[in-house]
Amino acid sequence: MSSGGDDSGMMSEINVTPFVDVMLVLLIIFMVTAPMMTTGVEVELPRVDAPSMPQKEESQLVLGVKGDGTYWIQKLQVPEEELLPKLKAIITANPQQDVFVQADAAVPYEKVARLMALCTEAGIPRVGLVTQPGVD
């Protein structure tokens, strides 16, 4: 005589406890190892005296960042929000325009990186950095 219950039937619920345990272990592993993967190696960059590249004076376009954080195109000060449209207009007029970036030594790296990113976003094919010859 059967009682009409489904005691011998299959269980239709999924036990997620092992899955959660594995996910928590992986989360902890990634939280511990992620900072190790993003930090750089401390290096002392070499100082070299490299010959300057020959350039035609009229073809040079110099972008600058002064110590106070202001941006310049040639000798014209430009607000940061106007840089991208101006750079796009320049590259539209002359697609092969070379650009040289010079920055004051006191300028934070973030400002120089931002200027380089704007050059890339504007579609400038070649960007160079202007430096002083190395001193010992």
Image (tube, rainbow, N blue to C red):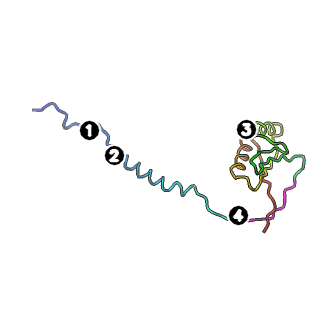
Residue at mark 3 to residue at mark 4: CA–CA distance: 33 Å
Q: Earlier in the sequence, mark 4 or mark 2?
A: 2
**Amino acid identity at mark 3:** Glu
Q: Earlier in the sequence, mark 3 or mark 4?
A: 4
Q: For mark 4, what is the residue?
A: 45
Q: Secondary structure at mark 3?
A: helix
Among the 4 quarters of the image, the one containing residue 135: bottom right
Give yes or no for contact between labels 4 and 2 (Cβ–Cβ under 8 Å).
no
Q: Nearer the viewer, mark 1 or mark 2?
A: 2
Q: For mark 2, what is the residue?
A: 17
- Magenta span: 46-54
Q: Earlier in the sequence, mark 4 or mark 1?
A: 1
Q: For mark 1, what is the residue?
A: 11
**Amino acid identity at mark 1:** Met
Q: Residue at x 80, y 39 (%)?
A: 91
Of residues 84 and 77, the one nearer the viewer is 77
Residue 81 badge: 3
